[in-house]
Amino acid sequence: MKQNSSHKTWKEKLHEIIYEADTRAGKSFDLIILIMILASIIVVMLESVSYLNDQYASIFNLLEWVITIVFTIEYILRVITINKPKKYIFSFFGIIDFLATVPKYLSLLFVGTHALVALRALRLLRVFRILKLARFIGESNNLTKALIASRAKISVFLFAVLIVSIILGTVMYLIEGPEHGFNSIPKSVYWCIVTLTTVGYGDISPETPIGQFIASVVMILGYGIIAVPTGIVSAEYSKQPKASLPPLNTQHCQNCNLSNHADGAKFCHNCGNKLHS
């Protein structure tokens, strides 16, 4: 049977709002926090613009203090609404929340640390919980395995690209020469790498017909080279087993603060504590 919400303590109700995003109140709470994080980052960015800071420094400072106080209250509530506060304090998100709160206080003691409030951008990671995207983070393990399995092929490929760049760079040095900006072989190799990767800064460019022809070949070659590592990794990634993931929700255990429980779960799969329904 579902637990009647009227029988829940204030601590349990607050825990649902702060830690869980399956309820309307939880989603609204997280949305407000995310908006305040964005607002704080925008304020910090605007403060770095000297003429804006000269005119609105007091307003920016006031907004920062309001946001900092709100985040401080939120951090305290997160600590007191779970049975084992250390589980949150030393968790990944707990450390991020702490780092996002203290810079404004540190700015009172140490000059120049105020800009560290940009660390609040890390708290945007909570959007994964709101949108239920955390279940897909496990896919990164397959990508990591694919990259590791491809390292030998990619290393050989990069070594071949380096050899080609040295050869073509040397050829361009001999053809164009210092009078056209190719002052040395290293600088010519630099031009070849920039052209081969399709970056094209334009600080050096060939002017002779032969040099322009070689440049055209390098540009076309660059498109093919870009596709090779992608193909290598994709081939390895397709070999990785695709495990089916159970549907998860955003419930956090009030006892051990563990998340990623299956939909419909009544008890924490880590400590056995009853979950909020």
Image: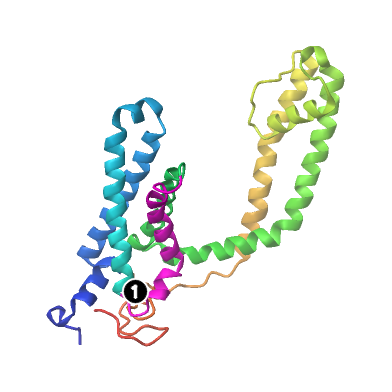
Residue drawn at (25%, 54%), measured in percent from left and top? 32
Q: Quadrant of residue 40?
A: top left
**In the rendered structure, which amino acid carries the disc numbered 1?**
His
Q: Which residue is mark 1?
A: 252
Q: Is residue 32 left or right of residue 171?
A: left
Name the one closer to the observer, 181 or 243: 181
Q: How is the image coloured?
A: rainbow
Q: Is residue 236 visible?
A: no
For image coordinates 25% across by 60% down, the residue present is: 29
Q: Is residue 72 visible?
A: yes
> Which of the two residues, 69 or 240, is positioned nearer the viewer here?
69
Q: Residues within 10 Å of mark 1 (few under 14, many from 20)?
A: many
Whole-percent x, y for residue 139 in the image: 52, 64
* Relative to 139, residue 68 above or below: above
Q: Residue 204 placed where, x, y %?
A: 71, 20
Left or right position of 73 against 100: left
Q: Quadrant of the C terminus?
A: bottom left
Magenta stretch: residue 88 in it?
A: yes
Which residue is rendered at x = 73% and y = 27% of the image?
A: 191
Residue occupying image coordinates x 26% and y 49%: 66
Q: Nearer the viewer, residue 181 or 174?
A: 181
Left or right: where does residue 51 sit relative to residue 239? left
Front residue of 48/191: it is 48
- For the record, the magenta segment spans 82-110
Whether residue 258 is in magenta: the answer is no
Quadrant location of residue 224?
A: top right
SS type, badge 1: loop
Quarter the N terminus occupies: bottom left
Please tell me whether residue 7 is drawn above or below residue 259 in the rendered image: below
Relative to 69, does residue 260 appear above or below in the rendering?
below
